[in-house]
């Protein structure tokens, strides 16, 4: 039986990443932490449990909470068309293919984009790193997913017809701003991060936090890792709601604890009603399933499927496994990840949760996934 610290030290020694930090809520309710390796390959600073990471798409669950708070207050409905709120979503088009000259062919969407569809990745929006069609469209048109303003790109399918990972929750962040009248960072601070005491979670790291940041890496030929320049824009940007946050394992475990607590943190702060959290834990995509993410940019992400062979759906904010996972989590557990190989799960049936953060491209590195599996097994083993 390996301890959490043993798992991380062994993973670093085996060359899985320059460094890792992990945290968990154990079956007995204890909160445990571990760190191993270096913040940056070739550097002197050791990984510590207060190291700051770019958590990328781990941001999505927090943005989902923000949106659902507004639903609770009656300020927006999950199923209303969003065109009146965000004119850029009023008349979406659907990409149907490319003509003989390679130019994109589109048609008007028949269905409306709604908040529920944004939060469940059924709106038709995609990410280019896991969509060959969107990658081709962006190459032909010269557009990007992160322009100065909101991107003007088509949907990859009719809203509601499929599940595909994409920028829907980035759009949901703009919905939160439009409905609340606050910048997303201010809304988060006032209604989620502040009440939960998540003082190390932010879109815009303070100078002191920057000194605790882990470097982002990529593997180099022959073994080892090299640090690469990387950082989210230092000003508000489109992709904040889907992937803009920095955080620590301690802060993120606090957030997961509130989700496990039915919307209430152990310290007493409530961020959602228990009935809303029940929706966040339940399948929201009907008979659709979540399968593999097929890489269209191998330097950004490998093709991967989390928990292959397990039937998976999407709730409001989370991946949900319908049968027990192979490393310990119960059926009905919640999970997702961040692009630089950050991972988490929360198990409402047992009260267990775990977080593993690293900073490494491409996403879904097999060795990091093996480390995450070992972390989960160690937590359940106690």
Image (tube, rainbow, N blue to C red):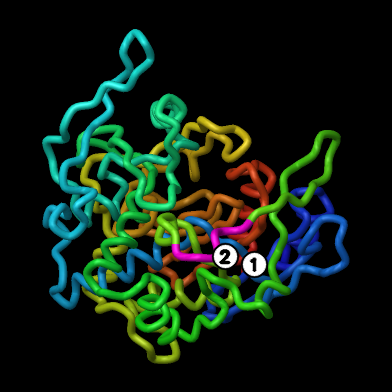
In depth, the one of 352 and 172 nearer the eye is: 172
Residue 184: mark in rendering: none
Main SS category, magenta section: loop
**What residue sits 52% from the left and 32% below the top?**
295
Image spot of residue 365 (x, y percent): 64, 43
**What residue sits 24% from the left and 47% below the top?**
285
Image spot of residue 290 (x, y percent): 36, 41
**What residue sits 33% from the left and 85% below the top?**
270
Q: Is residue 198 above or below residue 312?
A: below
In depth, the one of 284 and 182 nearer the eye is: 182
Badge 1, how many Cα within 10 Å: few under 14, some, many 20+? many
In space, the residues marked 2 and 1 are separated at their CA atoms by 5 Å
Residue 311 horizontal side relative to residue 378, left or right:
left
In depth, the one of 100 and 333 nearer the eye is: 100
Residue 171 horizontal side relative to residue 232, left or right:
left
Q: Quadrant of the N terminus?
A: bottom right
Residue under circle 2? Answer: 355
Q: Quadrant of residue 309?
A: top left
**What residue sits 53% from the left and 54% below the top?**
338
Residue 374 is a magenta residue = no
Image spot of residue 307 (x, y percent): 49, 44
Image spot of residue 362 (x, y percent): 63, 42
Q: Secondary structure at mark 2?
A: strand
In depth, the one of 49 and 173 nearer the eye is: 173
Tell whether label 1 touches label 2 (CB within 8 Å).
Answer: yes
Which contiguous range is marked in magenta? 231-236
The mark that comes first in sequence, 2 or 1, is 1
Look at the image and tell me whether residue 330 can be seen.
no
Badge 2, how many Cα within 10 Å: few under 14, some, many 20+? many
Look at the image and tell me whether residue 90 can be seen.
yes
Residue under circle 1? Answer: 22
Q: Residue furthest top?
A: 100
């Amino acid at each position: 039986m390996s301890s959490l610290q043993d798992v991380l030290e062994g993973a670093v020694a085996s060359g899985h990443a320059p460094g890792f930090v992990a945290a968990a809520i154990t079956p007995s309710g204890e909160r445990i932490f571990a760190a191993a390796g270096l913040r940056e390959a070739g550097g002197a600073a050791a990984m510590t449990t207060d190291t700051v990471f770019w958590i990328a798409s781990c941001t999505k669950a927090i943005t989902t909470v923000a949106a659902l708070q507004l639903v609770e207050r009656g300020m927006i409905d999950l199923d209303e068309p969003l065109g009146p709120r965000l004119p850029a979503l009023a008349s979406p088009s659907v990409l149907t293919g490319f003509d003989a000259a390679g130019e994109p062919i589109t048609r008007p969407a028949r269905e409306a984009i709604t908040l529920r569809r944004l939060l469940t990745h059924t709106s038709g929006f995609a990410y280019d790193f896991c969509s060959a069609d969107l990658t081709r469209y962006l190459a032909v048109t010269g557009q990007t997913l992160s322009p100065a303003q909101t991107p003007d790109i088509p949907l990859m399918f009719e809203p509601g017809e499929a599940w595909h990972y994409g920028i829907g929750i980035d759009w949901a962040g703009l919905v939160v701003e439009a409905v609340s009248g606050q910048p997303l960072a201010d809304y988060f601070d006032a209604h989620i991060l502040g009440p939960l005491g998540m003082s190390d979670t932010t879109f815009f790291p303070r100078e002191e936090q920057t000194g605790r940041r882990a470097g982002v890496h990529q593997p180099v030929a022959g073994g080892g890792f090299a640090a690469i320049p990387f950082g989210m824009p230092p000003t508000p940007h489109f992709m904040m709601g889907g992937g803009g946050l920095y955080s620590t394992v301690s802060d993120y475990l606090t957030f997961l604890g509130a989700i496990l607590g039915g919307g209430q943190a152990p310290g007493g702060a409530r961020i959602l009603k228990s009935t809303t959290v029940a929706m966040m834990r339940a399948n929201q995509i009907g008979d659709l399933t979540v399968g593999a993410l097929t890489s269209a940019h191998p330097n950004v992400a490998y093709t991967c499927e989390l928990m292959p062979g397990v039937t998976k759906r999407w709730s409001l904010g989370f991946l949900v496994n319908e049968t027990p996972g192979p490393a310990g989590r119960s059926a009905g557990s919640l999970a997702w990840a961040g692009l630089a190989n950050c991972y988490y799960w929360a198990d409402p049936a047992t009260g267990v949760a775990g977080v593993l953060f690293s900073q490494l491209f491409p996403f879904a590195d097999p060795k990091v996934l093996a480390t995450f599996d070992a972390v989960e097994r160690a937590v359940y083993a106690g």
